[in-house]
């Protein structure tokens, strides 16, 4: 393992982050568990950054990929592609967007990049609204709209980005307000901001901010925003890369908690739909998707083998009601962790929905972020056989919990017990 780490450092970028003091090589997985190169078994509560959505080595997906690989793996979008059309039909139907068109990419970053291309072309402006504490990917354009300094390595951008209040409920200038007044204050801020600039192309927002520590506004905020945006024809892009496909339990898409003013104009997705295969995509109303006046293709987006995986994975998700399982098991897990948090002065908040749970840590007796303890909890959980993630934005540190949606009650209890012990060791 030390040899592999040394080789990694020799040929890969210094900024390519690795978890743990002694980085982990995962060699195989099954269900909700993975194994490392030393034979240690772990309960996986992070799923490759919310990507292993259903289960590791899911037989239905493995079979579909194997059979497709035996026929043809790839041909590009220059040829008709039956699996791509079939998955696009299903995604368009599930999207809630009228007359929806779907374009497949290879990642969430590329999906957001495409959404920005569509919105700015359709609206003929390069000004974009984004949320503070947001993260939308690592491409040049996506970095330019990311409102999280820790994940924004350059201030250079092809876009003019204006940041809006509202993505973080319990911090910031409106934190002390009740939900109704919080939404009203954020809407007033948006109206004021729009009074100082030319009409932007779009607002892009994660219904629950992923890298930012699984923070979210009160339900209905983006619906209230949308009423304001529609007055000037400004588009709403919902970044569902982490929240889509039923992970929040209560809804299939995160935007549905804010759907009182109708569906978004554009939805981006990725991660879980491929269950580890590289699939991203954009869903948009036809007049927006079709606004480009030049040719465009994707060499690897929508390739047959990834589409076969996506079809099998989506079918399994729907046939086994994994959204319902996320709601039930996730609800139990959140309550269990909140009971633990009530006894620990370093846990500021347990938040989230379904199987998308954030545990924000602070230095006891203060409201200051505690990244040192977050790293210590991550290490202690790993030593006890549990893999979790971490995140946070401006002056915050949070643990990120996002297991595969097939998580059982027994596994949730096991993971919660390990996490409780790890938290107690830090506080």
Image (spheres, grey):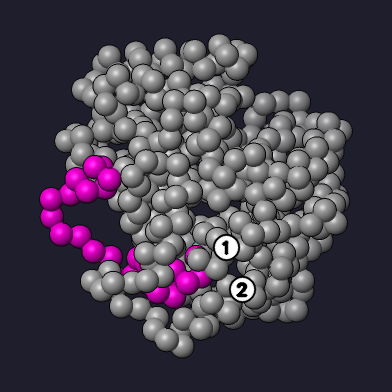
**Residue 312 picture location, percent across and down:** 55, 68
Residue drawn at x 57%, y 45% is 252
Residue receiving disc 2 = 60
- The image quadrant of residue 178 is top right
Q: Tell me if residue 260 comes above or below residue 268 in the rendering.
A: above
* Residue 425 magenta: no
Name the quadrant of the C terminus. top right
How many labels were placed on the picture?
2
Identify which residue, 348 or 286, lies in the foreground: 286
Residue drawn at x 85%, y 56% is 410
Disc 1 or 2, which lies upstream in sequence? 2
Q: Is residue 327 left or right of residue 92?
A: right
Residue drawn at x 24%, y 42% is 287
Q: Are marks 1 and 2 in contact (CB under 8 Å)?
A: yes
Residue receiving disc 1 = 315
Range of residues picked out in magenta: 286-310
Identify which residue, 382 or 116, lies in the foreground: 116
Q: Is residue 185 left or right of residue 246?
A: left
Identify which residue, 121 or 197, lies in the foreground: 121
Q: Tell me if residue 72 comes above or below residue 336 in the rendering.
A: below
Tell me, yes or no, if residue 103 can be seen here. Answer: yes
Q: In the structure shown, which secondary structural element does the residue marked by tag 2 occupy?
A: helix
Q: In the structure shown, which secondary structural element does the residue marked by tag 1 occupy?
A: helix
């Amino acid at each position: 393992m030390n040899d592999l780490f040394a080789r990694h450092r020799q040929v890969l970028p210094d900024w390519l982050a690795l978890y743990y003091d002694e980085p982990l090589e995962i060699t195989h997985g099954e269900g909700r568990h993975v194994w490392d190169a030393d034979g240690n078994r772990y309960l996986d509560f992070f799923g490759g950054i919310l990507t292993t959505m259903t289960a590791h080595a899911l037989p239905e997906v493995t079979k579909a990929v194997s059979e497709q690989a035996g026929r043809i793996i790839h041909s590009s979008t220059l040829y008709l592609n039956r699996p791509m059309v079939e998955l696009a039909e299903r995604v368009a139907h599930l999207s809630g967007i009228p007359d929806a068109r779907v374009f497949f990419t290879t990642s969430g970053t590329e999906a957001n990049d495409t959404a920005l291309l569509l919105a700015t072309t359709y609206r003929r402006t390069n000004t974009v609204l984004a949320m503070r504490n947001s993260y939308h990917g690592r491409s040049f354009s996506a970095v330019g709209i990311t409102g999280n300094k820790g994940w924004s390595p350059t201030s250079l951008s092809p876009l003019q980005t204006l940041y809006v209040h509202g993505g973080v409920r319990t911090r910031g200038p409106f934190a002390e307000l009740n939900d109704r007044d919080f939404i009203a204050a954020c809407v007033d801020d948006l109206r004021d901001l729009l009074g100082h600039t030319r009409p932007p192309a779009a607002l892009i927002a994660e219904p629950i901010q992923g890298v930012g520590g699984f923070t979210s506004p009160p339900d209905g905020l983006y619906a209230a925003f949308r009423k304001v945006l529609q007055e000037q024809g400004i588009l709403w892009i919902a970044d569902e890369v982490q929240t889509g496909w039923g992970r929040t339990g209560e809804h299939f898409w995160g935007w549905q908690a804010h759907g009182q003013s109708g569906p978004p104009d554009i939805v981006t997705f990725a991660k879980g739909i491929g269950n580890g295969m590289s699939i991203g995509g954009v869903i948009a109303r036809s007049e927006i998707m079709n606004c480009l006046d030049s040719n465009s293709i994707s060499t690897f987006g929508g390739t047959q083998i990834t589409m076969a995986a996506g079809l099998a994975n989506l079918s399994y998700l729907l046939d086994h009601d994994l959204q319902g399982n996320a709601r039930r098991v996730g609800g139990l897990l959140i309550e269990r962790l909140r009971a633990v948090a009530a006894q620990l002065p370093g846990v500021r908040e347990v938040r989230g929905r379904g199987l998308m749970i954030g545990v924000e840590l602070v230095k006891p007796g203060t409201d200051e972020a505690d990244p040192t303890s977050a790293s210590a909890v991550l290490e202690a959980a790993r030593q006890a056989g549990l893999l979790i993630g971490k995140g946070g934005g401006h002056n915050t540190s949070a643990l990120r919990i996002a297991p595969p949606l097939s998580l059982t009650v027994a596994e949730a209890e096991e993971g919660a017990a390990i996490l409780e012990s790890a938290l107690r060791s830090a506080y």
